[in-house]
Image (cartoon, helix red, strand yellow):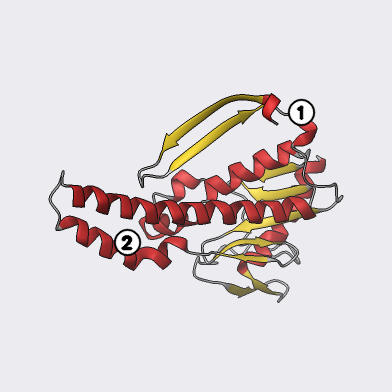
């Protein structure tokens, strides 16, 4: 691609690493990586598990931050004992920044791997239009939601779908996907957030909360996609 290079930018991260970003001019068909499958899927995003599909696939929440939480706390305690402006203080800041960069890169890589799986197997992905900013106001969930990266996942999925002539259809954020029985359509208004499994009071069907939500998202997505 050397003849297509338009610009290059060298930047330095907080940890002292260097990143070279190269802008390359490419034809649209060079972005296409995934073949057509004529299949669609509904997905539910969660904190316990990251992505659950209507075909029963589960992508776990890797909890990259939680795995490094103790290490970061230790590094920050060490930083608090150093004099601001000193070389040792600067080196400690770089150590902390390095941990966060590695963690961020791992999360970014995982998001891309999940998105690639979905677009490799499906032409249309239905998902809820989550109110991420509103969810972050819930102090009990904010940390977990930030760690999972819902917004980044949604943006990455939409961009890659567009590049590959595939579709992401968003379901209204107020659609009761978790509370609706995927078998009979009954809406269980008394369902609580901590109820991971429930039985439909109307037809008796037993549901895994997240899988049931993914099925309902699939059905609702098909309905609005045809309308």
| x and y, in percent, of residue 49 in the image | 57, 65
In which quadrant is the N terminus drawn? top right
Is residue 42 visible from the viewing direction of this image? yes
Q: Earlier in the sequence, mark 1 or mark 2?
A: 1
Q: Residue at x 31, y 50 (%)?
A: 94
Q: Nearer the viewer, residue 19 or 207?
A: 19
Total tally of numbered discs in the picture: 2
Give the label on residue 39, or none: none
In which quadrant is the C terminus drawn? top right
Q: Residue at x 26, y 51 (%)?
A: 91
In-image side of 99 versus 9 (left or right): left
Q: Is residue 90 above or below residue 147?
A: above
| x and y, in percent, of residue 117 in the image | 71, 56
Identify the element where label 2 is drawn: helix
Q: Which residue is mark 2?
A: 72
Q: Residues within 10 Å of mark 1 (few under 14, many from 20)?
A: few
In-image side of 184 versus 86 (left or right): right
Residue 79, image quadrant:
bottom left
Image marks 1 and 2: residues in contact by CB distance under 8 Å: no
Q: Nearer the viewer, residue 195 or 204?
A: 195
Q: Residue at x 42, y 67 (%)?
A: 67
Q: Which residue is mark 1?
A: 27
In-image side of 83 versus 216 (left or right): left
In-image side of 6 versus 118 (left or right): left
Inter-mark Cα distance, 1 to 2: 43 Å
Identify the element where label 1 is drawn: loop
Is residue 200 visible from the viewing direction of this image? no
| x and y, in percent, of residue 68 in the image | 39, 64
| x and y, in percent, of residue 24 in the image | 65, 29
Q: Nearer the viewer, residue 145 or 92?
A: 92
Q: Residues within 10 Å of mark 2 (few under 14, many from 20)?
A: some
């Amino acid at each position: 691609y050397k003849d297509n290079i338009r610009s290059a930018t060298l930047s330095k991260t907080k940890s002292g690493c260097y990143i070279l970003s190269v802008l390359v001019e490419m034809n649209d068909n060079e972005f296409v990586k995934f073949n057509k499958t004529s299949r669609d899927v509904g997905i539910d995003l969660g904190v316990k598990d990251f992505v659950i599909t209507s075909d029963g696939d589960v992508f776990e929440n890797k909890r990259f931050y939680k795995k490094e939480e103790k290490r970061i706390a230790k590094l920050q305690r060490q930083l608090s004992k150093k004099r601001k402006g000193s070389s040792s203080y600067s080196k400690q800041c770089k150590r902390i920044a390095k941990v966060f960069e590695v963690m961020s890169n791992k999360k970014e890589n995982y998001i891309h791997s999940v998105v690639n799986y979905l677009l490799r197997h499906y032409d249309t992905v239905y998902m809820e239009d989550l109110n991420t900013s509103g969810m972050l106001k819930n102090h009990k969930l904010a940390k977990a939601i930030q760690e999972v990266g819902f917004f980044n996942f949604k943006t990455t999925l939409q961009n890659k779908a567009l590049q590959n002539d595939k579709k992401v259809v968003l379901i209204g954020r107020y659609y009761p996907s978790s509370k609706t029985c995927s078998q009979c359509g009954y809406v269980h208004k008394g369902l609580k957030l901590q109820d991971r499994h429930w039985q439909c009071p109307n037809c008796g069907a037993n549901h895994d909360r997240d899988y049931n939500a993914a099925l309902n998202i699939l059905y609702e997505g098909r309905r609005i996609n045809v309308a």
